[in-house]
Amino acid sequence: MSVTELARAWAAVPQIETLRASGDGRWAFWSWSGLGEVAEIWAAPTDASAPPQPLTTRSRDHLTIRDVDQEGRRLILAHSPDSCEHDQLLLLDRDRGNALTPLTALQRDHYVYGGRFSPDGAAISYISDFDDESGTVIAGAILYRHDLATGARTILFRTPDPFGAGTEWSPDGRHLLWHRHRLAPGATQIWVIGADGSAPRELVCLGEKAVAVGWWLDSDRVALVADGPDGDRVGIAALGGGGIDWLAGEPDLNPQSLVIGAAGRFACLAYDDSVLGAVVFDGRAHSPLPNLSGRGALLPLDGLPDGGWLAEAYDASAPHEVVRVAPDGTCTRLASVPKGDRRFVVPQSVHWTAPDGERVQGWLYRPEGPARGHVTYVHGGPTWHSEDWVNPKIQFWVGLGYTVLDPNYRGSTGRGMRWREKVKEDGWGGREQADIRAGTEAVIALGLARPGRIAVAGNSYGGFSSWFAITRHADLVTAAIPMCGMYKLDIDYDATEMPWGRAYSEEMMGGSPDEVPERYANASPGNFIADIRGHVMVVHGLADSNVGPENTHAAIRDLTAAGIPHEAMLFEDEGHGVTRRGNLEAYLVRTAVFLDRAFDGGQG
């Protein structure tokens, strides 16, 4: 298979997003990318009586699902121009030939989070930083109730706080659950408010810096995952008060998120060394969710009325699948695609020791035959983690003959609260970068890579880490492919448009650029470009509202002024990443050429 054919094959591998069930459990809906130029909405009956069918086709931009009504006849969708994340909400009506009706305006200047049906289907709720009354973008957020029959919008609450999620209706429709960030940067409190905007009150606040995230368990109780003195924990809070009933937590259980099921049961997405092992809570008792899917991981994403689950089954051996999980654990496959001509490589979970003695975990992919070189692929976040799953970029590079290491450096999720919080000890650009370097050196020590043919790549925080590697680890790294990465952290702080963006930087860095300027300066790769000895290919979506393109514009100006050779790949129709199928194919082909040239040219 030629490089172009290989890139085309991996750009077309399907990716599943926003998997949801109808309230009656009869239908499954998901956003499926790779089959067309952008992600479209698909549906299948959960009894597997018919194959999946697309509800949308030939869309201009990716579509994702915000909610599904009781009978699966209407869906709330979201899309944004060129993936800029300034979303528009749409109503898809299956009874009208899948007609799409705008609920909010198509725009590029504000944010719309949420979009959930009320239990009676008459209204939706969402949060935005656009004030309908004044017609202006505001600092803070407004909680809206939108009547679907009349189109009337009612303001339920205003807050000056940053926001990063929508709202959820209680099953009886009397209350809305939402999350506020009114204390220290990054801290989260759980609030409830009447469906008419009355009696807003704080339900859970565990401290100035603590995080608590909740979901309605029933109309009177909220299940939650929260920080604790000894790690993350799971509990239940009642609207009537009485404190929190803590059910489980670290070190016995490492919870990350919850999925509400039927009759007061819920699934907890728990991880052990970055490996998913969901458990189901029934009252105070919990037991593992059986994985009879035949795949390495089974991720429940929505509850079904019969006590089962709608789930994604996955590992790196084949495209991910949509399955229905019966109450006894039996799995019924609802959607899958063949491997085709693609050769899927399954990674090995590996560990290495960081310079300060910490044990780091990651995923190592090996090509067939001797390696042509090595790529360390750094995931974004940093509060995220990589698993044994299909990553088209990684599979493409392994197919070219490179080893690839995908490290879960400190700051990553999937290994408990202690590991996630350790990145804050130094702030970005600290010992998490030593974790990544030590992983690359461990691959070299195994004889699977050699100096002179080492690259670092990644998107977002992975882009920042790529910049960091080519500047601060110039003795080791020959090539870097930063995508949508932070080049100078003060630029990133000023340029981000995300409502939570500056608070996230302050949480991770211990303050703003004005408060801790040395930290921002010392961690910014752009202040060390004179140390570059290797090759740089910088990539950015020009519609990115998260890590602003000014990061890359500044980098190109600086590299040009300094006479440092570099390549640039900029996309007018991409946001925070390269996600359109044609663009991803072009990116993969370009990286193949770049890596060949970089490794043949060596370090300067």
Image (spheres, grey):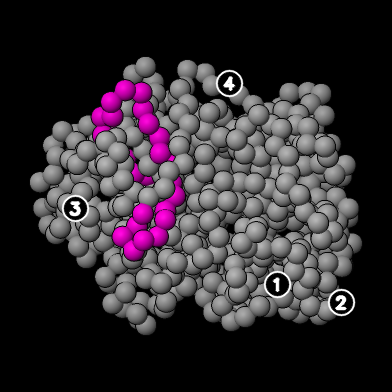
**For residue 170, above or below residue 314:** below
User: Which of disc 2 and disc 1 is earlier in sequence?
Assistant: 1
What element does badge 3 sit on?
loop
Q: Identify the residue shown where x is 83% and y is 72%.
A: 238
Q: Position of residue 280 (x, y in %)?
A: 76, 50
The residue at which mark 3 appears reads as 474
Q: Are marks 4 and 1 in contact (CB under 8 Å)?
A: no
Alpha-carbon distance for marks 4 and 3?
42 Å
Rendered image quadrant of residue 116: bottom right
User: Which of disc 4 and disc 2 is earlier in sequence?
Assistant: 2
Alpha-carbon distance for marks 4 and 1?
43 Å
Q: Identify the residue shown where x is 56% and y is 29%.
A: 319
**Which residues make up the magenta segment?**
353-377
Q: Position of residue 329 (x, y in %)?
A: 78, 36
Q: Are marks 2 and 4 in contact (CB under 8 Å)?
A: no
Q: Amino acid at mark 2?
A: Gly
